[in-house]
Image (tube, grey):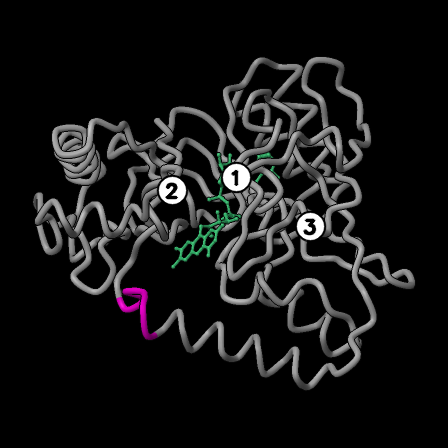
Amino acid sequence: MKDQLIKFITSEYSDRVDIIKDADMKDHTTFRIGGPCDIALFPHDRNSFCTVLDFVNKNGIRYVVIGNGSNVLFSDEGFRGVVIFTTKMKSFSFEDDLLICDAGVQLTAVSVRAVKEGYDGFAFACGIPGSIGGAVYMNAGAYEGQISDILVYSDFYDPKTGKIERLYADDHKLGYRYSTYMDNDRIILGAAFRLTKADDPDSVLALMEDHVRARKEKQPLEYPSAGSTFKRYPGYFTAALIDEAGLKGYSVGGAQVSEKHAGFVINKGGATARDVLELIQIIKDKIYQNKGIHIECEVRYID
Ligand SMILES: Cc1cc2nc3c(=O)[nH]c(=O)nc-3n(C[C@H](O)[C@H](O)[C@H](O)COP(=O)(O)OP(=O)(O)OC[C@H]3O[C@@H](n4cnc5c(N)ncnc54)[C@H](O)[C@@H]3O)c2cc1C
């Protein structure tokens, strides 16, 4: 069936879907970890994305949709099936104060563009290395802002019906690093956001530059990672809990608790997914021992 998929794409969509066979997930994720998938596909627009989704769905081909790969850890054995990346779907437009984006639009690029167009509301996302699809999926946020503050609707493909539908903000059940997309297999095609006219775009831009500077100072951006490894536990700062547990700098193989920011597990060099998973378990166990609380992983493991 996978051969048929490649045949279908090369005969009808060769100029609108890129194909890489046996693509290594370490080359397509910010953690730089993960074995090969069978086929990686990169549709260029919503139409070809939906066609690919329809094909894999109707033919029972196992697949997963990935944006920038900045919040995932792929297994060392890779993924048996098709990985569909949205990163080439980069179209966005402004319709008055509504910003309409394809799933693959980069958060930093669109936040810079929005302020250049004179809008405020997206500044918080500058420096988050993800896509619109990944950000809606988990209600990404930083610096007092999050997707739920500005989301108007998202469009999705429903594998159960093969239909494209629209979900309005209230129906996303958006919470801290949570959306309803985490509980179903719907695929986000794009989303629209309500922005406001900035009184002083230069000061918004300056604020975004401050955010980027602060990230460079506080986060181990010099090493591959998937950002904060764990979710915040109510009433605690996870990085402080890990630090207090004496785990700053602790390593398993090539995976290490960053010495700069204990909330990040980094790939110090040659880390395997197994190293990372073992380190995560050690951290969870130690924190449970110390505080009696179960901290949860924010990073999604895919095998
Ligand atoms: C250095 C660094 C700093 C970070 N800082 C922050 C931060 O400040 N705040 C924050 O919230 N996050 C942060 N992150 C995490 C990450 O960038 C965000 O969670 C981002 O929103 C993930 O987007 P992505 O496109 O990379 O998603 P991916 O990692 O590609 O995917 C994440 C999940 O979303 C699903 N998904 C992706 N696209 C779709 C789609 N179109 N339809 C359905 N499901 C989809 C995937 O299947 C996967 O389960 C950081 C990460 C790094 C590496």
For the residue pair 174 and 135, the one nearer the viewer reads as 174
* Residue at 8% in and 45% down: 253
**C-alpha gap between disc 1 and disc 2:** 9 Å
Query: Which residue is identified by label 2?
Result: 232
Identify the amino acid type marked 2: Arg
| Quarter location, residue 163 | top right
266 relative to 60 in the view: left or right: left
**C-alpha gap between disc 3 and disc 2:** 19 Å
Q: Looking at the image, is 98 positioned above or below residue 251?
A: below
The reply to whether the magenta stretch includes residue 284 is: no
- Element class at badge 3: helix
Q: Position of residue 21 (x, y in %)?
A: 43, 39
Whichever of labels 1 and 3 marks the residue nearer the N terminus, that label is: 3
Q: Residues within 10 Å of mark 2 (few under 14, many from 20)?
A: some
| Quarter location, residue 214 | bottom left
- Element class at badge 1: loop
Which region of the structure is painted magenta? 217-222
Query: Which residue is identified by label 3?
Result: 149
Query: Which residue is identified by label 1?
Result: 176
Q: Are marks 1 and 2 in contact (CB under 8 Å)?
A: yes
